[in-house]
Amino acid sequence: MSTAAPLLLIPELRDGVLHPTTARLFGAGTALAEARSAPLVALLIGDGAETQAPRAQALGAGTVYTMSGDVPGPGSAQAWTRACASAVDAIAPSVVMMAATAVARDVAPRLAVRLGASLADACQSVAVDGGHLLVRRSAYGGRALVEQRLPADARIVLTIRPASFEARTPATHATGPVEAIPVPDGAASDGVEPRGSERVGGERPDVTEAEIIVAGGRSLKSAENFRLLEDLADALGGAVGASRAAVDAGMQPHERQIGLTGKTVAPRLYLAVGIDGAIQHLAGMRGSRVIVAVNTRRDAPIFEHATYGCVHDLFELVPCLTREIRRAQGA
Ligand SMILES: Cc1cc2nc3c(=O)[nH]c(=O)nc-3n(C[C@H](O)[C@H](O)[C@H](O)COP(=O)(O)OP(=O)(O)OC[C@H]3O[C@@H](n4cnc5c(N)ncnc54)[C@H](O)[C@@H]3O)c2cc1C
């Protein structure tokens, strides 16, 4: 049995179920735990912690720690950080790992400061290299890849970019201990409005978490016309993104901006609708697995980066596409 300090995964629970990024978090965590010969454990905080524990075990967690009752939602960053820090004190892991969601963006730096730990954010790969942990992450809007060597004996907080890791397939039979950790004093509320878990546009995922993104540019012409993209995104179960030109024109909120001065995304499918493909936009989305571009201009730069391109007017094409997808779904 391993005597190494455990590697702790903190997946999010939303509405009582594990967040869709969880299987990929376990994919990254399992590989690192094996490389370090460390036990893999998980911490579930909030409603559904106990009921979701078997799923965390099926994904590879040995012990699952739960903290439920009067606990904050993950959107309440300060209170959630306090809850995580208290659990980390009890579990004493060497590495704490979260998926780089909107919540983790708020919580991970706070947690690292509280723990006096090193932080590596939005990692695209994580490996053991001698006495170090070697992480790779993009910088300067995706134009550079940074390698960070962190001493393996120091406490480390990592967030991983889910799209860069394979999802772990759940085992059919898995059991293990489930241990309750008490809610620390003052963790229930910090008087701060939840922010990180806010979802722009109701049930649509945030662009940093979505597997599919339908993004639009200046060519949409108005906020109302973005409804076309929202309908398509809803049909595909995806998120809506925007170029800076669309955001600057007030058609979309900044939360949806993708690019150098917006968010970096790496979904399975990125639909760039009426987006030119400026370098600053590409900086935020060129890590997408499949890029489909729709543009009236055959020589738009986006086509150089697209897996599939369609030279067509978006106002004609998008409603047809949504209709056909809905028809195929039997809706
Ligand atoms: C420091 C700095 C930071 C920046 N950060 C960002 C950033 O984070 N994100 C970002 O996106 N940009 C960023 N920009 C801006 C960037 O340079 C571009 O200006 C912006 O991305 C252009 O947005 P767009 O493609 O929507 O608009 P446009 O450049 O106006 O392109 C519109 C496209 O739509 C096509 N089109 C028009 N009508 C239709 C139609 N009916 N159907 C189909 N296609 C149509 C056109 O052919 C064209 O290709 C930044 C710029 C600077 C200087």
Image (cartoon, rainbow, N blue to C red):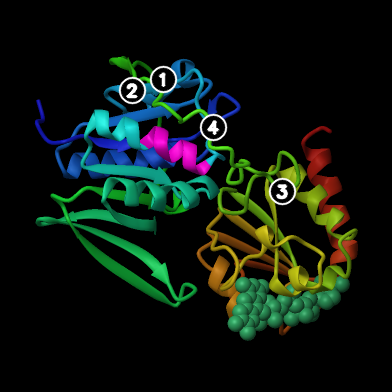
Report how far apart the C-alphas of labels 4 and 3 lie in the structure: 23 Å
Q: Secondary structure at mark 1?
A: helix
Q: Nearer the viewer, mark 4 or mark 2?
A: 4
Q: Earlier in the sequence, mark 2 or mark 1?
A: 1
What residue lies at 60% left-to-right and 27% top-to-bottom? 15
Q: Secondary structure at mark 2?
A: strand
Report how far apart the C-alphas of labels 1 and 3 lie in the structure: 29 Å
Residue 184 lies in quadrant:
top left
Judging by the rendered image, the residue that carries numbered circle 4 is: 189
Q: Mark 2 near mark 1, Cβ–Cβ under 8 Å?
A: yes
**How far from the left and from the top, in percent, is residue 266?**
53, 58
Q: Secondary structure at mark 4?
A: loop
Q: Nearer the viewer, residue 52 or 109?
A: 109
| Residue 117 shows up from this direction | yes
Q: Earlier in the sequence, mark 4 or mark 3?
A: 4
| Residue 10 shows up from this direction | no
Vertical relation: 266 (above or below) 61: below
Judging by the rendered image, the residue that carries numbered circle 2 is: 64
> Image quadrant for the N terminus?
top left
